[in-house]
Image (spheres, helix red, strand yellow):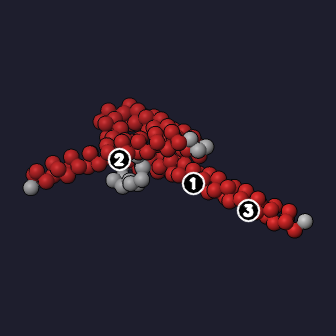
């Protein structure tokens, strides 16, 4: 009877270890997936800040939204409506990526990473050109 109890304890600890590993993996997916929601939300906050004319913004947001805002802001009121709609669509895509990332889809993480890197590149390119033109004047 005692050996059966020892065997059950050993099997239970193996089951617990695999269960713990699965739970850790699920927690990692959820933690990473929530970042996509934060990025989308902060990007929309950046859009609101831009609309009201402040020069500040969150660095974590998507740079492509600032590119869109800068492009459409020269079109007047119609441009404002256009960049708000496009920003909402971009944020919606990022929320969808976050949704699938929370479900553990690896492709969502890959697409989200590529999209964020491209967006960061647009932002860096914009500011690099600005500072480069400034340095050429000196």
Query: What label does residue 15 carry, if any?
Result: none
Q: Residue 58, image x and y in percent?
A: 40, 54
Q: Residues within 10 Å of mark 1 (few under 14, many from 20)?
A: some
Viewport quadrant of the C terminus = bottom left
Q: Residue 106, image x and y in percent?
A: 53, 42
Q: Label 3 belongs to which residue?
A: 13
Q: How far apart are marks 1 and 2 (CA)?
A: 24 Å
Position of 77 compared to 13: left or right?
left
Residue at horizontal 23 percent and vertical 49 percent from the top: 128
Query: What label does residue 28 carry, if any?
Result: 1
Circle nearer the N terminus (2, 3): 3
- Which numbered disc, 2 or 3, marks the residue closer to the eye? 3
Q: Is residue 103 above or below residue 135?
A: above
Q: Do the residues labelled 2 and 3 touch (CB within 8 Å)?
A: no
- Which numbered disc, 3 or 1, marks the residue closer to the eye? 3
Q: Nearer the viewer, residue 56 or 64?
A: 64
Circle nearer the N terminus (1, 2): 1
Q: How far apart are marks 2 and 3 (CA)?
A: 45 Å
Q: Is residue 59 visible?
A: yes
Q: Label 2 belongs to which residue?
A: 120
Circle nearer the N terminus (3, 1): 3
Outermost residue on the bottom side: it is 2
Q: Is residue 51 visible?
A: no
Position of 22 compared to 97: left or right?
right
Residue at horizontal 31 percent and vertical 36 percent from the top: 71
Q: In which quarter of the image is residue 19?
A: bottom right
Viewport quadrant of the N terminus = bottom right
For label 3, the SS is helix
Q: Residue 125, image x and y in percent?
A: 26, 45
């Amino acid at each position: 009877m005692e050996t059966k109890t020892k065997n059950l304890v050993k099997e239970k600890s193996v089951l617990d270890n695999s269960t713990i590993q699965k739970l850790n993996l699920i927690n990692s997916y959820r933690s990473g997936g929530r970042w996509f929601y934060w990025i989308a939300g902060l990007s929309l906050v950046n859009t609101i800040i831009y609309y009201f004319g402040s020069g500040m913004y969150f660095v974590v947001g998507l740079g492509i939204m600032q590119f869109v805002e800068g492009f459409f802001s020269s079109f007047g009121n119609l441009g404002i409506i256009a960049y708000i709609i496009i920003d909402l669509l971009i944020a919606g895509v990022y929320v969808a990526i976050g949704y699938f990332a929370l479900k553990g889809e690896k492709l969502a993480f890959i697409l989200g990473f590529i999209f964020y890197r491209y967006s960061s590149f647009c932002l860096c390119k914009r500011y690099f050109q600005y500072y480069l033109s400034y340095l050429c004047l000196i």
